[in-house]
Amino acid sequence: MYFIGIDLGTSSVKTLLMDENGAIIHVASRSYDVCYPREGWSEQSPEDWYNSSLDAIRELIAGIDPGKVKGISCAGQMHGLVVLDETDRVIRPAILWNDGRAEAEASYLNREIGADVIAANTGNIAFAGFTAPKILWMRKNEPENYRRIRRIMLPKDYLVYRLTGTFVTDVSDASGMLLYDVEKRCWSERMMEICGISKVQLAAVHESCDVVGKIKPEIAADLGFGEVRVAAGAGDNAGASVGTGVVREGQCMISLGTSGTIFIPLNAFRADESHSIHSFCDTNGKYHLLACMLTAASCGKWWIEDILGTTDYNEEMAAFSPDATNSVYFLPYLMGERSPHNNADARGVFFGMSMSTTRGQMTQAVYEGVCFGLRDSMVVAKGLGISFDSVRLCGGGAKSRLLCQMVADIMNLPVELTQIEEGPSFGAAIIAAVGCGVYKDVCDAADQLIRVREIYRPDPNRVATYNRRYAFFRTLYPQNKELFEKLTGGVL
């Protein structure tokens, strides 16, 4: 029998076909557009997600007996606001996770309602990218659309709704909406009141591996499926943690994709008092800490493709200094920042350039800036007394040997790569298999399926250099914070 995992990402959807033994049979993907109607805004068409997913699935199952597909699950980009009217039509383009338009609404929640009140009811404070501030933005700026809202969904849950007709979400994805009480694992009555919405507009919440429906008969017939169960799924990072086997306390995952994240499983609910990193529910019935940078590998894409005008990443990165020396620094806040600064006004900055600065130094600084930014959140996590002996790396950045070594040196931790690199889509397929009873739970599946294939160990000399340079990097954001606010506020 086969299981399909879907990774509904920001730039593309990736589908993966897995058998009951965890072997990857095939992968297929489709790209779609992101629209940036204004600076700091980011939108997508939910219809593109659905059409692209079906196209990818058709390619995925070519050459196999589709009647042997028994389960499907989806891991998806988090926090996006998808709203449907009473006829189940999408009201407006989805407002994505990296959209910063709701900064004023996030500020209202944290300052006027009170960060302590918000945290007491959700486990987190407001960030502009979360779903609740986007709802408040709609109420203020698009009142007619706001009044039409019948269903409020997250991106992967829209796809599940189209495939099954079931209006559901899972605990890990719901945790990032700022409408969900993470510790109590239920919708927050107080947050619904603040946003002016009711529980009937919100999906039924399930644990990630719960079977929540079956593929609609007409879709199943089109694809050649028999009865295919659909599991609730997970947010993309929670899905990736399953795909990399990071499912127990004492482990840590770093993802270097469009965004950059640090994922740390916990046995019990725990919140960072400064709320610079998030506390969410996990796929294993427990909890995790999540730190998210809005731009990670996307900083490299912006620099190398958009600015330098090339696609030869290897050539650009070949100029990296082997001993980690560099006089140039880069603040990687091209779309504002979430963890740990929670500042939609933050912007990218090159610092330290001179007439002798080389293109290679600037490229190196971009990637170092991303890793330094992730280390900012790692410092917060370790300040909570959380410890781990290594990290597992996934995402596009994990394909670069130079970046794997850079992460090891900057974090001063061994970096592990797993045999299967597919992360969220593999994790989603595992969740589907758990839902269908092939594995007891995600921990059981991880024990049987996940193996480490390569380890990058920190170099003591580069670690010492990066410790000195990171100390200087940490001084740059505070000294620029006021300037960011003036820049985005139109003062400069």
Image: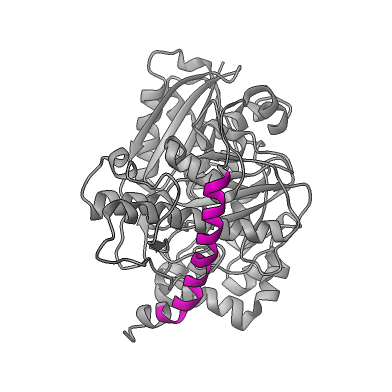
* Rendered location of residue 209, percent (x, y): 66, 36
Number of numbered discs visible in the structure rendering: 0
Q: Nearer the viewer, residue 188 or 143?
A: 188
Q: Is residue 466 magenta?
A: yes
Q: Is residue 154 magenta?
A: no
* Residue that lies at the very extreme toward the bottom in this rendered image: 491
The image shows residue 130, relative to residue 297, as above or below, that is below
The reply to whether residue 205 is in sight is: yes
Q: Nearer the viewer, residue 192 or 279?
A: 279
The reply to whether residue 152 is in sight is: no
Q: Nearer the viewer, residue 282 or 356?
A: 356
Image coloring type: one colour
Q: In the image, what residue occupies the spot 51% across and 57% down?
A: 372
Q: Is residue 403 left or right of residue 452?
A: left
Q: In the image, what residue occupies the spot 42% across and 35% down?
A: 14
Q: Quadrant of the C terminus?
A: bottom left
* Rendered location of residue 167, percent (x, y): 56, 47
Q: In the image, what residue occupies the spot 64% across and 33% down?
A: 245
* Rendered location of residue 425, percent (x, y): 50, 34
* Residue that lies at the very extreme toward the left in this rendered image: 309
The image shows residue 157, relative to residue 272, as above or below, that is above
* Residue that lies at the very extreme toward the right in this rendered image: 268
Please identify the dominant SS of the magenta region.
helix
Query: Which residues are drawn in magenta?
Result: 460-483
* Rendered location of residue 436, percent (x, y): 65, 26
Q: In the image, what residue occupies the spot 42% across and 64% down?
A: 333
Q: Nearer the viewer, residue 275 or 151?
A: 275
Image quadrant of residue 198? bottom right
Q: Is residue 158 left or right of residue 357?
A: right
